[in-house]
Amino acid sequence: MPELPEVETIVRGLRTVLPGHTIIAVRLEKTDFIEDPIGVGELLPGQRVEAVDRMGKFIWLKLTPTPGAKNSDKHLNLVVHLGMTGWLGVRRQEDPVAPHTHAFFELEDGRELRYTDIRRFGQILLVGQDEMGRLTARLGREPLELAFPEFTARLAGRHARIKALLLNQSVFRGIGNIYADESLWQARIHPARLASRLSSADLKRLWNAIRRVLQQAIEDRGSSISDFVDAEGQPGEYQQRHRAYGREGKPCFRCGAKIRRDIVAGRSSYFCPRCQPAPRKRTTRASSRGRA
DNA sequence: AGCTCTTCCTGAAAGC
DNA sequence: TGCTTTCAGGAAGAGC
C-alpha cells in the first residue's frame, strides 16, 4: 500500500519524464473516485506539467496553462492520492493497458499519463491555486522535515494511542500502517501506548526510528507487498527489511520472541511482545470503575 | 478529544 | 472441486 516512501518513489519517477509536457486530451473510465470528473475532462487539455511534488501521500502535479487551455489565466493542480492500490505512470499510447486503468491523460508527444487503481480507494482532485492552502492545512508536518522538538510538541499531551497518532495525517503526513509498525518496532514502543505517557527517551528513539525507516525505505524504492510498483513498473525492496509488519508468529529479529498481531487503532498492528512491552493497564471503563 | 464502527472496493485466501 | 465468506486497508463520517 502506498505510503510516503512509495509515493516518493512514484514522484521521483514521474519527475524524470513528465515536466514540460502538455496534456492534450483526457479519457476517463470509472470516475467515482474523481472529485470533479467533468472539470478534469474540460480543464486539463492544454495544461502543461510544470513540476511534480509530494505532500504526504499525495502526488502533486503543478500545471501551467498553454495558449490552447480553457481558463488560461488560472493555475491548476492535479492532486492524486493512490489509496490502497493506486498507480500513476507514463506509458506510450500503444503500450498494453493494465486492468482497472480508469484515467488516461494524453500528452503531446504520443505518451499518456495513466491512473490505475483496483479498489478505487484513491482520489483525483483538481485544485485551484487558492484552494491548495486549504488542502495543505488539513495535513500535518512532513516527518522527514521535522526537528525533534517539533515532533515532541505534536505529541505532547495527546491521550491517543501512539499508533493512532502516527497514522493520523493531520499530525504527521505520509506515515501508514507499515511504516508506523516498523518505526515502533525499531523504537521498542508498543503501538497501544498513550502518547502522553511516552518518556523523552521513548520519543527520541521514535523520532530517530521514523527517520531511519523512511529514509531507508525511500532508498529501497518502497515496499512491495501485494502489488506496488514504481512509475516504471519495478517493485521496491524495503519489504525485505520488514521487522514487524506481516511477520505474525515469526521470531523477532532482536529477541526471538514471536511477533504478535493485535488490532490497535482499528488496524492490524504487528509488534514484538517482549521488546515492545504493553502499557501497564488497559484504560477500560471496567478497570477504572473497579478502582473507584 | 478520541474512541469504535461503518462505508467505499476488489481479489486473495480461508472455510465449508 | 467449487462456491461462499472473510479479510485487508486509507480516509471520512456517524455516533458515543
Image (cartoon, coloured by chain):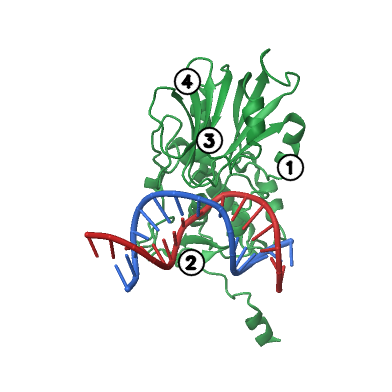
Chain colours: A green, B blue, C red
- The residue beneath circle 4 is A111
Circle 2 residues within 10 Å: few <14, some 14–19, many ≥20: some
The part of the image, by quadrant, that contains residue A155 is: bottom right
Residue type marked 2: Asp
Q: Is residue A74 above or below residue A142?
A: above
User: In the image, what residue type sits under mark 1?
Assistant: Ala
Q: Is residue A190 left or right of residue A223?
A: right
Q: Nearer the viewer, mark 3 or mark 4?
A: 4
Q: Secondary structure at mark 3?
A: helix
Question: Tag 1 or tag 3, which sits nearer the N-term?
Answer: 3
Total residue callouts: 4
On the image, the x and y values in percent for residue A1 come to: 48, 46
- Closer to the chain start, of discs 2 and 3, is 3
At a point 59% along the width and 75% down the height, the residue shown is A282
Q: Are marks 3 and 1 in contact (CB under 8 Å)?
A: no
Mark 4: few, some, or many residues within 10 Å (few <14, many ≥20)? Answer: some
Q: Which residue is mark 2?
A: A262
On what subunit does the disc labeled 4 rest? A
Q: Specify which label sits upstream in the sequence, 2 or 1.
A: 1
Q: Quadrant of the C terminus of chain A?
A: bottom right
Give the answer, above or below, for where A58 lies relative to A96.
Answer: below
Which residue is nearer to you in this view: A202 or A290? A290
Q: Which residue is mark 1?
A: A137
Chain where mark 1 sits = A
